[in-house]
Image (cartoon, rainbow, N blue to C red):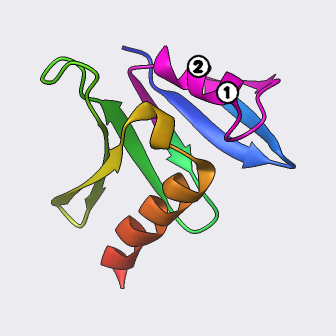
């Protein structure tokens, strides 16, 4: 499984595959964004105030939800993100903030 790294930069989604960064013509929270996201099984989100790895739980539950995972100080934190159509940039940023708060 290849894990993509997503960055939000100047209103575009940047996707990092290994060492290459590709600018996708995806407007955040658009129908194209959700269609593209539905084809992914995992990604790494780097937000303004935190980061996490997200996995789509389709193996356990058909049309399953996405979960955010973050390892901090030898402890694993998990957070339910929601269904694909609920994964807005705001939801991703809030999840990154919530998981980052465990460092304080």
- In the rendered structure, find residue 35 and report the number of the disc placed on it: 2
Name the residue nearer the viewer: 3 or 88: 88
The 10 Å Cα crowd at callout 2, few under 14, some 14 to 19, many 20 or more, is few
- Residue 20 shows in the view: no
Q: Quadrant of residue 101?
A: bottom left
Disc 2 to disc 1: CB gap under 8 Å = yes
Residue drawn at point x = 49 percent, y = 65 percent:
94
The 10 Å Cα crowd at callout 1, few under 14, some 14 to 19, many 20 or more, is few
Specify the segment rendered in magenta: 16-43
Residue drawn at point x = 35 percent, y = 44 percent:
82
Residue drawn at point x = 64 percent, y = 64 percent:
48
Residue 26, position in %: x, y?
76, 28
Q: Secondary structure at mark 1?
A: helix
Residue 94 versus residue 81 in the image, above or below:
below
Residue drawn at point x = 33 percent, y = 32 percent:
55
Location of the C terminus by quadrant is bottom left
Q: Secondary structure at mark 2?
A: helix
Query: Farthest residue in the right direction?
Result: 10
* C-alpha separation, residue under disc 2 versus residue under disc 1: 6 Å
- In the rendered structure, find residue 31 and report the number of the disc placed on it: 1
Name the residue nearer the viewer: 36 or 75: 36
């Amino acid at each position: 499984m290849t894990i993509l790294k997503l960055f939000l930069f100047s209103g575009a989604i940047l996707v990092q595959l290994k060492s290459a960064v590709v600018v996708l013509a995806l407007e955040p929270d658009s129908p194209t964004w959700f269609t593209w996201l539905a084809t992914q099984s995992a990604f790494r989100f780097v937000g303004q105030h935190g980061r996490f790895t997200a996995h789509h739980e389709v193996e356990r539950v058909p049309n399953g939800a996405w979960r955010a995972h973050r390892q901090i100080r030898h402890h694993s934190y998990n957070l339910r993100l929601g269904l694909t159509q609920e994964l807005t940039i705001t939801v991703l940023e809030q999840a990154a903030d919530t998981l980052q708060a465990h460092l304080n």
